[in-house]
Amino acid sequence: MTFRQRHLLGIDPLHPTEITEILDLADKYVDLNRQSIKHSDVLAGLTQINMFFENSTRTQASFELAGKRLGADVMNMAMQASSIKKGETLIDTALTLNAMHPDLLVVRHPHSGAVDLLAQKVNCAVLNAGDGRHEHPTQALLDALTIRRRKGRLHRLNIAICGDIAHSRVARSNIILLGKMENRIRLVGPTTLVPSVFSEFGCEVYDDMNEGLRDVDVVMMLRLQRERMDGGFIPSEREYYHRYGLDAEKLSKAKPDAIVMHPGPMNRGVEIDGDIADDINRSVIQEQVEMGVAVRMAAMDLLAQNLREGVV
Ligand code: ASP
């Protein structure tokens, strides 16, 4: 086993061989999840606690399902109703949970860096389920698995990530992962949402969709992260859709077999046309959700193995 991490806090610390190992194992879990009996005991006896300090649909559901399919005892903390509301600090909450001996802690938090901080205070493996605009590693891994299965490889592809790059942890984790695997990454969006500083990360920056999508293999659309915006980044949603919303005409600039991705939640008629999102010949959005469960099973399986072997 080459995956030697104690936590999964981001893509940044991972070596390409570790990424490949997670994806290879996730492929096996895709097969398991397609059977009528979807069960394994690799996490039997272990306790998984999910702490989501920010709203989530797909990520929370798939972490819960992943843990249950692997036989863990899974507990979802209702953070809205927790003592955080009574003034308890994140660290005190973490220490309280730590005293209950969890083995896997899945955490989403609105502040970048909060999950790393928490990981330093507990004895179990911590998985980052999204921290502020910093990282969302399991999203990038599930995107990578989807691309690898659809395109037959995860290198030397032209990939356009479009929309609100500035506020997106999905974009950040994907830029790191796809860069490590030696793909050509284009970032496409208005200059207010795609600052030119991103060219320092080895990405090409475009503010014109028709140019940015030309001959790409993968089109990844992102939602406007309004919860992290503190000003007018776009003139209006209508104008934004006109210039940056993915419709059939803009998509025609990409390769004829280019796939369309979106991490969800999707805003139809803002960043993507509903017909494109539903086009089963182009859109792999539902497949991304399926891959999400498998990738989270793989990540928790590998972390649990390291936990047993005492990897620090
Ligand atoms: N679900 C993703 C996230 O948590 C993307 C989004 O919210 O737009 O970052």
Image: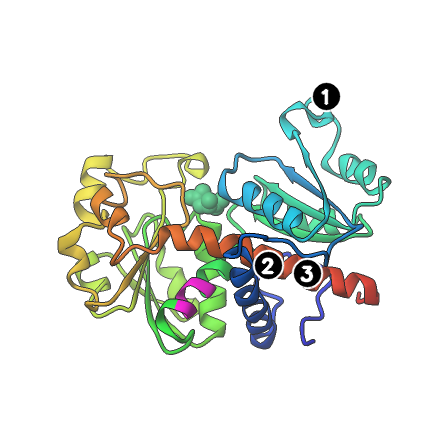
The residue pinned by badge 1 equals 86
Q: Where is residue 306 in the image (x, y as percent from the top left)?
A: 76, 65
Q: Mark 3 points at which residue?
A: 301
Q: Which of 130 and 91 is in front in this view?
A: 130
| Colour treatment of the image | rainbow
Q: Is residue 136 something that shows in the picture?
A: no
Q: In this view, does 63 lie above or below 137?
A: above
* Distance of label 3 from label 1 (alpha carbons): 35 Å
Q: Which of 279 and 125 is in front in this view?
A: 279
Q: Residue furthest right?
A: 99
Q: Is residue 32 left or right of residue 181?
A: right
Q: Is ligand 1 closer than 8 angstroms to the Cβ of mark 1?
A: no
Label 2 sits on residue: 10
Check residue 302 for magenta coloring: no
The C terminus sits in image quarter: bottom right
Point out the residue furthest to the top here.
Answer: 86
Tell me which residue sits at (49%, 65%) in the image: 176
The boundaries of the magenta stretch are 145-149
Give the mark nearest the N terminus, 3 or 1.
1
Residue 162: % across, % down: 31, 55
Q: Position of residue 154 (x, y in %)?
A: 43, 73
Quarter containing the N terminus: bottom right
Q: Which amino acid does label 2 sit on?
A: Gly
Q: How far apart are marks 1 and 2 (CA)?
A: 30 Å
Q: Which amino acid does label 1 sit on?
A: Lys
Q: In which quarter of the image is residue 307?
A: bottom right
Name the dominant secondary structure of the magenta segment.
helix
